[in-house]
Image (spheres, helix red, strand yellow):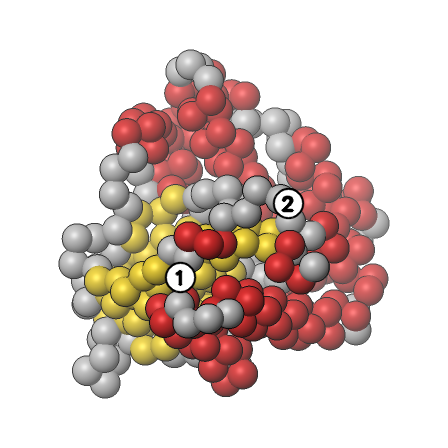
Amino acid sequence: MTLNMLNILWLAKSEYPAGSSLTPHKHDYYQIYYVISGEGDFIVGNESVKMGRGKYLFTRPNDIHGISSTRDVDGNPLRMLEVKYVVFDNELEESLNQIPIVCQGTDNIEEMLALVFKEGIDTLPWYLEIATHTFIAVLYYMIRFQKIELSTNPKKSKVVDQIKENIQKNYKNEISLDHLAKFVGHSKNYICKTFKENTGMTINLYLNKVRIDKAGELLLNTDYDVAEIGREVGYNNIFHFIKTFKKIVGTSPGNFRKNELTGNALVSSKVKAIATIPTQQTRHDI
């Protein structure tokens, strides 16, 4: 039954020489980037976060993310353990969606991810079962920490959920901090601090992220021009829309549409990755 909870799509141990980059992008599956050496400036929505050894990026479907630059630390380049996966269990997915996009790792999580990677590379008997069960344990370790954080502040968690729900419903319209503060019944300072503590991002970043995510969907699935899409997701000024889109995604709406549809590579050519796709992982009985 456990194997039906998720599919591991791809495993990699990647190496990014100093000065490498990863174009901001999004996809319809989950991905984890766990840093094991070096340092990088990771793009999260329209913010940049410096990440080094022991930190990891936890991206959900449609989270925009990338890397603007990488640096060696003590002679070691940015190296990461990466996992791409899809989740089929609703309860697990609900819990995963509470994890911040930028997290501090632990020795246990790193060791278990290394085991998942080793099983995927070695493909010895029962590798799929061992890799999947171990990876599920990794996810529950991540959830456990976040649940402890949230359980001590149930009132704050409710405020964050209310803000997210309001933004998701009204992103096409003008949304101000005054409006959100009045909606949840707290001060602007309180909601800004609470939202940042619980999600790892500002309210403004979340709003822009929602809008740009929706814009990306329209760019790929409709024939609307850029101005129409900008208005559709809440930007009345086309220049502001293009500037915000480029800041978050790393390229213009037009280039995004072209690159996504033609499948151009996202990663610098200098990047190396030892990867495996466990083909036996594809199951049609779920």
The circle drawn on residue 178 is none
Task: Give percent across and percent down for residue 206.
Answer: 57, 47
Q: Quadrant of the C terminus?
A: top right
Q: Quadrant of the N terminus?
A: bottom right
**Which residue corresponds to the image point at 35% horizontal and 38% vertical from the top-left?**
246
Q: Is residue 252 above or below residue 276?
A: above
Q: Is residue 42 visible?
A: no
| Place of residue 40 in the rendered image (x, y in percent of width and height, measured from the top left) | 32, 67
On the image, the x and y values in percent for residue 56 come to 46, 68
Amino acid type indicated by mark 2:
Ile
Q: Is residue 21 above or below residue 181?
A: below
Instruction: Count numbered badges in the picture.
Output: 2
Label 2, residues with CA under 10 Å away: few <14, some 14-19, many ≥20: few
Disc 2 from disc 1: Cα separation: 21 Å
Q: Residue at x 48, y 36 (%)?
A: 212
Residue bearing the label numbered 2: 286
Q: Nearer the viewer, residue 158 or 216?
A: 216
The furthest residue to the left: 270
257 sits left or right of 192 in the view: left
Q: Which image quadrant is residue 143 in?
A: bottom right
Mark closer to the observer (2, 1) = 2
Q: Label 2: state its secondary structure.
A: loop
Mark yes or no: residue 163 visible.
yes
Q: Going 29% across and 75% down the picture, which residue do you hit?
A: 38
In the image, which disc is placed on residue 11?
Answer: 1
Examine the image and state in which quarter residue 34 appears: bottom left
